[in-house]
């Protein structure tokens, strides 16, 4: 990814001998006496710092901001990354965050966005009702919304802040329908929060929701609940672990499935699934 990376910088102080450390502390007194005081002040003043000898043949060039009588402490500067992508005729700027797996863009999301944009004749989203499971940074929901869908982006409650920010910033003035962002905890209170009688979707979208976590059974339960007769579930995923393939086996037993596309370089597959008639 071309996102900005975290920067970690530390300010390393020289290692001083006990005698040198004691001398440096003496120079830090606020009151000094005439010439001796001026000499000590010059030693402690950064602009008069000289290159101290650390050993017989070793020297260390000190920057003026480093004073040997100060205790060493690491300083970490960090920033949130941004991804700049181009889909559906627009530059999309995704703010990433430190919210675990949901805070970054994964390969399956990019592959799914590309697939939806390139296959609008077969999978047209204009005026369709779409719900995304595990929206994360919101990229897939944003692209689906720009392509004309009425989108509900869902994820865990603790990651909705960054999701709302990205969705709002990238869809304002670009969409036919205003997107929604809602909480969805896999496997919990599904009928009360997303009742089947009223929540009928044309498409359920999911990208890289299967990885090394303990909620795979709840995820499958959620997919089955939301994917009613007439709903198409489009799931893109990079396959990394044996548990991913175990989930795929259960997924194939639960739905009528077919492979829509494969991206070997990304190790991503895209599946279409429909409600399985018993």
Image: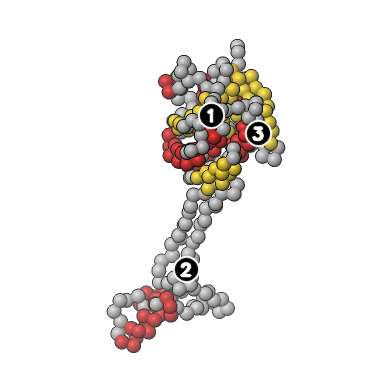
Real-space Cα distance between discs 1 and 2? Answer: 57 Å
The percent position of residue 12, horizontal first and vertical second, equals 49, 66
* Residue that extends furthest to the right in the rendered view of this protein: 264
Real-space Cα distance between discs 1 and 3? Answer: 15 Å
* Residue that extends furthest to the bottom in the rendered view of this protein: 35
Residue drawn 58% across and 24% down? 233
Residue drawn 43% across and 62% down? 73
| Residue 199 makes an appearance in the image | yes
55 above or below 215? below
Question: Crowding at label 3, few (<14), some or many (≥20) Cα neighbours within 10 Å?
Answer: few
Front residue of 180/154: it is 180
Could you say whether the residue bearing mark 2 is in a helix, strand or loop? loop
Residue annotated with mark 1: 149
Residue annotated with mark 2: 13
First in residue order: circle 1 vs circle 3: 3
Could you say whether the residue bearing mark 3 is in a helix, strand or loop? helix
The percent position of residue 152, horizontal first and vertical second, equals 48, 29
| Residue 19 makes an appearance in the image | no
141 above or below 58? above
Residue annotated with mark 3: 118
């Amino acid at each position: 990814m071309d996102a900005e990376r975290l920067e970690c910088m530390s300010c390393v102080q020289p290692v001083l001998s006990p005698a040198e450390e004691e001398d440096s502390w003496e120079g830090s007194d606020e009151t000094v006496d005439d010439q001796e005081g001026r000499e000590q002040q010059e030693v402690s003043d950064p602009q008069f710092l000289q290159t101290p000898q650390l050993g017989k043949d070793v020297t260390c060039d000190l920057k003026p901001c480093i004073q040997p009588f100060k205790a060493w402490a690491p300083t970490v500067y960090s920033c949130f990354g941004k991804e700049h992508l181009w889909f559906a005729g627009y530059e999309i700027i995704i703010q990433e965050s430190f919210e675990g797996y949901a805070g970054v863009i994964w390969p399956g999301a990019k592959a799914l966005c590309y697939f939806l944009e390139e296959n609008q004749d077969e999978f047209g989203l204009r005026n369709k009702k779409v719900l995304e499971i595990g929206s994360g940074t919101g990229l897939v929901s944003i692209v689906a919304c720009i392509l004309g869908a009425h989108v509900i982006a869902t994820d865990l409650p603790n990651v909705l802040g960054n999701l709302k920010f990205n969705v709002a910033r990238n869809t304002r003035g670009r969409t036919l329908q205003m997107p929604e962002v809602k909480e969805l905890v896999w496997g919990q209170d599904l009928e009360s929060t997303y009742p089947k009688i009223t929540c009928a979707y044309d498409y359920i979208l999911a990208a890289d929701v299967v990885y090394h976590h303990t909620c795979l059974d709840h995820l499958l339960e959620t997919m089955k609940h939301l994917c009613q007769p007439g709903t198409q579930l489009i799931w893109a995923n990079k396959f990394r672990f044996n548990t991913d393939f175990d989930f795929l086996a259960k997924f194939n037993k639960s739905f009528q499935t077919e492979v829509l596309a494969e991206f070997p370089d990304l190790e991503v597959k895209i599946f279409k699934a429909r409600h399985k008639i018993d």
